[in-house]
Amino acid sequence: MVERLIFQTLKVKTQCIAFLQNLQTIKKMRNKKNNTPTTVTPSKETRFKVSEPVELMTFLLAKMGGMSRSSIKSLLAHRQVMVNDVISTQFNFSLKPNDKVVVNSIRGNTELSHPKMKIIFEDQFLIVVEKKEGLLTVSTGKSDETTAFSILKNYVKKSSPQNRIFVVHRIDRETSGIILFAKTREIQLAMQEHWHEVVTRRVYVALVEGKVEKEKDTIVTWLTENEKSLKIHSSNVDNGGQQAITHYKVVKSNEKYSLLEIELETGRKNQIRVHLQGIGHPICGDKKYGSNVSPMGRLGLHARILAFIHPMTLENVNFETPVPRNFLNVFH
Protein backbone atom coordinates (compact mmCIF):
# COMPACT_ATOMS: atom_id res chain seq x y z
CA MET A 1 0.00 0.00 0.00
CA VAL A 2 2.85 2.41 0.88
CA GLU A 3 4.56 1.69 -2.43
CA ARG A 4 1.31 2.43 -4.31
CA LEU A 5 0.91 5.74 -2.47
CA ILE A 6 4.46 6.71 -3.39
CA PHE A 7 3.75 6.16 -7.06
CA GLN A 8 0.43 8.02 -6.89
CA THR A 9 2.13 10.98 -5.27
CA LEU A 10 4.73 11.06 -8.01
CA LYS A 11 1.97 10.75 -10.65
CA VAL A 12 3.74 7.84 -12.33
CA LYS A 13 1.84 5.46 -14.57
CA THR A 14 0.53 2.26 -13.03
CA GLN A 15 3.05 0.25 -15.04
CA CYS A 16 5.65 1.38 -12.48
CA ILE A 17 4.23 -1.24 -10.14
CA ALA A 18 5.61 -3.89 -12.50
CA PHE A 19 8.95 -2.10 -12.40
CA LEU A 20 8.94 -2.18 -8.60
CA GLN A 21 8.02 -5.87 -8.56
CA ASN A 22 10.90 -6.53 -10.95
CA LEU A 23 13.28 -4.71 -8.62
CA GLN A 24 11.97 -6.60 -5.61
CA THR A 25 12.80 -9.81 -7.45
CA ILE A 26 16.28 -8.48 -8.17
CA LYS A 27 16.83 -7.69 -4.49
CA LYS A 28 15.77 -11.22 -3.52
CA MET A 29 18.10 -12.69 -6.14
CA ARG A 30 21.00 -10.67 -4.73
CA ASN A 31 20.36 -12.07 -1.26
CA LYS A 32 20.50 -15.70 -2.29
CA LYS A 33 22.81 -17.53 -4.63
CA ASN A 34 22.42 -21.25 -5.25
CA ASN A 35 20.06 -21.31 -2.23
CA THR A 36 22.92 -20.64 0.20
CA PRO A 37 22.71 -18.07 3.01
CA THR A 38 24.12 -14.63 2.30
CA THR A 39 27.37 -13.84 4.08
CA VAL A 40 27.08 -10.52 5.88
CA THR A 41 30.31 -8.52 5.90
CA PRO A 42 31.09 -5.73 8.37
CA SER A 43 30.03 -2.31 7.14
CA LYS A 44 32.80 -0.03 5.90
CA GLU A 45 30.50 2.97 6.07
CA THR A 46 29.56 5.28 8.93
CA ARG A 47 26.14 6.88 8.55
CA PHE A 48 24.79 10.03 10.16
CA LYS A 49 21.56 12.01 10.02
CA VAL A 50 21.66 15.80 10.25
CA SER A 51 19.41 17.41 12.89
CA GLU A 52 20.12 21.10 12.35
CA PRO A 53 21.67 23.41 9.72
CA VAL A 54 25.46 23.19 9.81
CA GLU A 55 28.51 23.19 7.51
CA LEU A 56 29.88 19.78 6.56
CA MET A 57 33.30 20.37 8.19
CA THR A 58 31.76 21.38 11.52
CA PHE A 59 29.41 18.39 11.38
CA LEU A 60 32.18 15.88 10.70
CA LEU A 61 34.48 17.34 13.36
CA ALA A 62 31.69 16.79 15.90
CA LYS A 63 30.78 13.29 14.70
CA MET A 64 34.09 11.67 13.74
CA GLY A 65 35.57 11.06 17.18
CA GLY A 66 38.17 13.77 17.48
CA MET A 67 39.53 13.73 13.91
CA SER A 68 41.56 16.84 12.99
CA ARG A 69 40.54 19.34 10.31
CA SER A 70 43.34 18.07 8.07
CA SER A 71 42.08 14.48 8.42
CA ILE A 72 38.55 15.57 7.53
CA LYS A 73 39.89 17.46 4.51
CA SER A 74 41.74 14.28 3.47
CA LEU A 75 38.45 12.31 3.59
CA LEU A 76 36.80 14.95 1.42
CA ALA A 77 39.72 15.16 -1.02
CA HIS A 78 39.68 11.38 -1.49
CA ARG A 79 35.92 11.46 -2.17
CA GLN A 80 35.06 9.33 0.87
CA VAL A 81 32.12 11.49 2.02
CA MET A 82 28.64 11.41 0.53
CA VAL A 83 25.70 13.71 1.28
CA ASN A 84 22.32 12.30 0.26
CA ASP A 85 24.08 9.66 -1.91
CA VAL A 86 26.17 12.25 -3.77
CA ILE A 87 29.94 12.51 -3.27
CA SER A 88 30.87 15.82 -1.63
CA THR A 89 34.36 17.37 -1.53
CA GLN A 90 33.40 20.84 -0.18
CA PHE A 91 34.27 21.33 3.50
CA ASN A 92 31.85 24.29 3.71
CA PHE A 93 28.92 22.44 2.11
CA SER A 94 25.69 23.54 3.86
CA LEU A 95 23.81 20.65 5.45
CA LYS A 96 20.09 20.81 6.19
CA PRO A 97 17.96 18.90 8.73
CA ASN A 98 17.32 15.28 7.67
CA ASP A 99 20.27 15.24 5.25
CA LYS A 100 22.09 11.89 5.26
CA VAL A 101 25.89 11.87 5.52
CA VAL A 102 27.92 8.72 4.80
CA VAL A 103 31.66 8.42 5.46
CA ASN A 104 33.44 5.56 3.68
CA SER A 105 36.48 4.20 5.54
CA ILE A 106 38.05 3.01 2.28
CA ARG A 107 39.44 5.22 -0.43
CA GLY A 108 38.35 4.41 -3.93
CA ASN A 109 35.89 7.00 -5.12
CA THR A 110 38.44 8.38 -7.56
CA GLU A 111 37.53 11.57 -9.35
CA LEU A 112 36.83 11.48 -13.08
CA SER A 113 38.89 13.97 -15.03
CA HIS A 114 38.17 14.09 -18.76
CA PRO A 115 37.75 17.04 -21.13
CA LYS A 116 34.74 15.49 -22.87
CA MET A 117 32.69 14.37 -19.87
CA LYS A 118 31.94 15.05 -16.21
CA ILE A 119 29.98 13.19 -13.54
CA ILE A 120 27.01 15.10 -12.11
CA PHE A 121 25.70 12.30 -9.86
CA GLU A 122 27.00 8.96 -8.60
CA ASP A 123 25.84 6.46 -6.02
CA GLN A 124 26.31 2.70 -5.66
CA PHE A 125 23.68 1.96 -8.32
CA LEU A 126 23.86 4.69 -10.99
CA ILE A 127 26.09 7.28 -12.64
CA VAL A 128 24.66 10.37 -14.37
CA VAL A 129 27.07 12.23 -16.63
CA GLU A 130 27.12 15.27 -18.88
CA LYS A 131 29.01 14.68 -22.11
CA LYS A 132 30.21 17.20 -24.65
CA GLU A 133 29.42 17.07 -28.35
CA GLY A 134 31.62 14.83 -30.51
CA LEU A 135 31.70 11.92 -28.05
CA LEU A 136 29.87 8.66 -28.80
CA THR A 137 27.82 7.15 -25.99
CA VAL A 138 28.99 3.64 -26.84
CA SER A 139 31.12 2.11 -29.59
CA THR A 140 29.54 1.24 -32.91
CA GLY A 141 31.92 -1.71 -33.13
CA LYS A 142 33.85 -0.24 -36.04
CA SER A 143 36.83 1.13 -34.10
CA ASP A 144 38.52 1.51 -30.73
CA GLU A 145 37.35 5.12 -30.48
CA THR A 146 36.99 6.63 -27.02
CA THR A 147 33.34 6.72 -25.89
CA ALA A 148 31.41 7.81 -22.82
CA PHE A 149 31.11 4.11 -21.96
CA SER A 150 34.85 3.42 -22.25
CA ILE A 151 35.71 6.49 -20.14
CA LEU A 152 33.36 5.37 -17.37
CA LYS A 153 34.47 1.76 -17.62
CA ASN A 154 38.06 2.80 -16.90
CA TYR A 155 36.89 5.15 -14.15
CA VAL A 156 34.95 2.54 -12.12
CA LYS A 157 37.73 -0.03 -12.48
CA LYS A 158 40.14 2.31 -10.69
CA SER A 159 38.15 1.66 -7.52
CA SER A 160 37.97 -2.11 -8.11
CA PRO A 161 38.80 -4.34 -11.13
CA GLN A 162 35.46 -6.10 -10.58
CA ASN A 163 33.40 -2.94 -11.13
CA ARG A 164 31.37 -2.71 -14.31
CA ILE A 165 29.23 -0.14 -16.10
CA PHE A 166 26.12 -0.56 -18.28
CA VAL A 167 24.47 1.76 -20.81
CA VAL A 168 20.83 2.57 -19.98
CA HIS A 169 20.14 4.92 -22.93
CA ARG A 170 22.06 6.91 -25.55
CA ILE A 171 22.22 10.33 -27.15
CA ASP A 172 23.73 11.10 -30.57
CA ARG A 173 27.47 11.71 -30.93
CA GLU A 174 27.02 15.39 -31.84
CA THR A 175 24.43 16.02 -29.12
CA SER A 176 25.72 17.20 -25.74
CA GLY A 177 24.05 16.67 -22.39
CA ILE A 178 22.88 14.15 -19.80
CA ILE A 179 23.24 10.36 -20.03
CA LEU A 180 22.40 7.70 -17.43
CA PHE A 181 24.49 4.57 -16.76
CA ALA A 182 23.84 1.64 -14.39
CA LYS A 183 26.38 -0.17 -12.24
CA THR A 184 24.70 -3.59 -12.50
CA ARG A 185 23.12 -5.43 -15.40
CA GLU A 186 19.98 -6.08 -13.36
CA ILE A 187 19.36 -2.37 -12.89
CA GLN A 188 20.20 -1.68 -16.54
CA LEU A 189 17.68 -4.25 -17.81
CA ALA A 190 14.97 -3.23 -15.34
CA MET A 191 15.25 0.45 -16.27
CA GLN A 192 15.39 -0.25 -20.01
CA GLU A 193 12.35 -2.52 -19.86
CA HIS A 194 10.29 0.16 -18.07
CA TRP A 195 12.03 3.25 -19.47
CA HIS A 196 8.89 5.08 -20.58
CA GLU A 197 7.20 4.46 -17.23
CA VAL A 198 10.03 5.53 -14.92
CA VAL A 199 11.35 8.53 -16.87
CA THR A 200 9.18 11.40 -15.66
CA ARG A 201 10.76 14.17 -17.72
CA ARG A 202 13.24 14.40 -20.60
CA VAL A 203 13.96 17.87 -21.97
CA TYR A 204 16.31 19.10 -24.70
CA VAL A 205 17.16 22.55 -26.00
CA ALA A 206 17.70 23.07 -29.73
CA LEU A 207 18.97 26.04 -31.71
CA VAL A 208 17.20 25.96 -35.07
CA GLU A 209 17.26 27.93 -38.30
CA GLY A 210 14.69 30.68 -38.80
CA LYS A 211 12.00 32.29 -36.68
CA VAL A 212 9.52 29.64 -35.48
CA GLU A 213 6.10 31.25 -35.68
CA LYS A 214 4.11 28.87 -33.46
CA GLU A 215 4.97 29.61 -29.83
CA LYS A 216 4.39 25.97 -28.91
CA ASP A 217 3.20 22.83 -30.69
CA THR A 218 3.21 19.04 -30.71
CA ILE A 219 4.62 17.08 -33.64
CA VAL A 220 3.32 13.55 -34.27
CA THR A 221 4.67 11.42 -37.14
CA TRP A 222 5.77 7.85 -37.91
CA LEU A 223 9.49 7.21 -38.40
CA THR A 224 11.28 4.62 -40.52
CA GLU A 225 14.99 4.14 -41.17
CA ASN A 226 16.65 3.70 -44.56
CA GLU A 227 19.00 0.73 -44.09
CA LYS A 228 21.47 2.00 -46.69
CA SER A 229 21.73 5.67 -45.77
CA LEU A 230 20.86 5.14 -42.04
CA LYS A 231 18.73 8.26 -42.39
CA ILE A 232 15.37 8.52 -40.62
CA HIS A 233 12.30 9.34 -42.71
CA SER A 234 9.11 10.86 -41.31
CA SER A 235 5.50 10.28 -42.40
CA ASN A 236 2.41 12.18 -41.29
CA VAL A 237 0.33 9.01 -41.62
CA ASP A 238 0.84 5.59 -40.06
CA ASN A 239 3.05 3.73 -42.53
CA GLY A 240 4.03 0.92 -40.19
CA GLY A 241 6.91 2.89 -38.67
CA GLN A 242 7.41 3.93 -35.06
CA GLN A 243 5.13 6.67 -33.79
CA ALA A 244 7.14 9.66 -32.54
CA ILE A 245 5.75 12.51 -30.42
CA THR A 246 7.68 15.72 -29.75
CA HIS A 247 6.46 18.77 -27.78
CA TYR A 248 8.23 22.11 -28.21
CA LYS A 249 7.98 25.73 -27.12
CA VAL A 250 9.94 28.79 -28.23
CA VAL A 251 12.30 30.20 -25.59
CA LYS A 252 14.04 32.90 -27.68
CA SER A 253 13.97 33.96 -31.31
CA ASN A 254 15.11 36.56 -33.81
CA GLU A 255 14.85 36.73 -37.59
CA LYS A 256 17.61 34.14 -38.12
CA TYR A 257 17.35 31.67 -35.24
CA SER A 258 15.03 30.21 -32.60
CA LEU A 259 15.91 28.51 -29.33
CA LEU A 260 13.41 25.75 -28.52
CA GLU A 261 12.73 23.76 -25.37
CA ILE A 262 11.78 20.26 -26.43
CA GLU A 263 10.08 17.60 -24.32
CA LEU A 264 10.00 14.04 -25.61
CA GLU A 265 6.97 11.81 -25.22
CA THR A 266 8.75 9.09 -27.21
CA GLY A 267 12.47 8.60 -27.71
CA ARG A 268 13.10 7.41 -31.27
CA LYS A 269 16.41 7.55 -33.09
CA ASN A 270 17.08 11.08 -34.48
CA GLN A 271 13.48 11.98 -33.50
CA ILE A 272 14.09 15.64 -32.65
CA ARG A 273 16.33 16.21 -35.65
CA VAL A 274 13.92 14.82 -38.23
CA HIS A 275 10.87 16.44 -36.61
CA LEU A 276 12.41 19.92 -36.67
CA GLN A 277 13.48 19.44 -40.28
CA GLY A 278 9.87 18.46 -41.01
CA ILE A 279 8.48 21.80 -39.77
CA GLY A 280 11.01 23.72 -41.85
CA HIS A 281 13.39 24.64 -39.01
CA PRO A 282 16.34 22.20 -39.03
CA ILE A 283 18.75 22.20 -36.10
CA CYS A 284 21.75 24.44 -36.75
CA GLY A 285 24.77 22.43 -37.87
CA ASP A 286 22.69 19.37 -38.78
CA LYS A 287 23.72 18.77 -42.41
CA LYS A 288 22.17 15.30 -42.36
CA TYR A 289 18.73 16.80 -41.78
CA GLY A 290 18.75 19.94 -43.89
CA SER A 291 20.76 22.62 -42.08
CA ASN A 292 22.86 25.02 -44.14
CA VAL A 293 24.32 27.10 -41.29
CA SER A 294 26.48 26.33 -38.26
CA PRO A 295 26.96 29.46 -36.14
CA MET A 296 28.45 27.42 -33.27
CA GLY A 297 30.52 24.96 -35.29
CA ARG A 298 28.53 22.07 -33.81
CA LEU A 299 25.05 20.51 -33.75
CA GLY A 300 22.69 22.80 -31.84
CA LEU A 301 21.13 20.11 -29.64
CA HIS A 302 21.64 19.60 -25.89
CA ALA A 303 19.99 17.09 -23.50
CA ARG A 304 19.31 19.49 -20.63
CA ILE A 305 17.00 17.71 -18.14
CA LEU A 306 16.53 14.07 -17.15
CA ALA A 307 14.14 13.11 -14.33
CA PHE A 308 13.32 9.52 -13.35
CA ILE A 309 12.32 7.18 -10.53
CA HIS A 310 15.51 5.99 -8.83
CA PRO A 311 15.41 2.17 -9.12
CA MET A 312 16.40 1.50 -5.50
CA THR A 313 15.31 4.51 -3.42
CA LEU A 314 12.09 4.99 -5.46
CA GLU A 315 12.59 8.76 -5.24
CA ASN A 316 11.83 11.00 -8.20
CA VAL A 317 15.29 12.43 -8.98
CA ASN A 318 15.88 15.36 -11.32
CA PHE A 319 19.12 16.37 -13.06
CA GLU A 320 19.57 19.61 -14.98
CA THR A 321 22.39 21.28 -16.89
CA PRO A 322 22.47 24.89 -18.09
CA VAL A 323 21.81 25.88 -21.69
CA PRO A 324 25.25 25.99 -23.39
CA ARG A 325 26.45 29.58 -23.68
CA ASN A 326 27.11 29.38 -27.41
CA PHE A 327 23.43 28.55 -27.95
CA LEU A 328 22.62 32.01 -26.61
CA ASN A 329 25.34 34.04 -28.31
CA VAL A 330 23.35 34.37 -31.57
CA PHE A 331 20.71 36.42 -29.73
CA HIS A 332 23.12 39.13 -28.49
Image (cartoon, grey):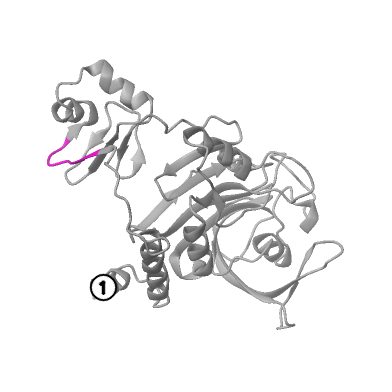
Secondary structure category for the residue under label 1: helix
- The answer to whether residue 70 is left or right of residue 225 is left
Residue 49 magenta: yes
Please state, as top left, top right, bottom left or bottom right, where the C terminus lies in the image.
Answer: top right
Q: Where is residue 272 drawn, in percent x and y?
A: 65, 61
- The answer to whether residue 174 is left or right of residue 70 is right
Relative depth, front residue between 139 and 46: 46
Please state, as top left, top right, bottom left or bottom right, where the N terminus lies in the image.
Answer: bottom left
Q: Where is residue 277 drawn, in percent x and y?
A: 73, 62
Relative depth, front residue between 137 and 224: 137
Q: Would residue 188 be seen by someone viewing this image from the given angle? A: yes
Question: Mark 1 belongs to which amino acid?
Answer: Leu
Judging by the rendered image, the residue that carries numbered circle 1 is 5
For the point 27% across and 16% down, the residue is 70
Q: Would residue 323 be seen by someone viewing this image from the given angle? A: no
Quarter of the figure with residue 90: top left
Crowd band around label 1 with a 10 angstrom C-alpha radius: few (<14), some (14–19), many (20+): few
Residue 86 magenta: no
> Which stretch appears magenta?
46-53
For the point 67% across and 46% down, the residue is 136
Q: From the viewer's perspective, is residue 186 above or below residue 326? A: below
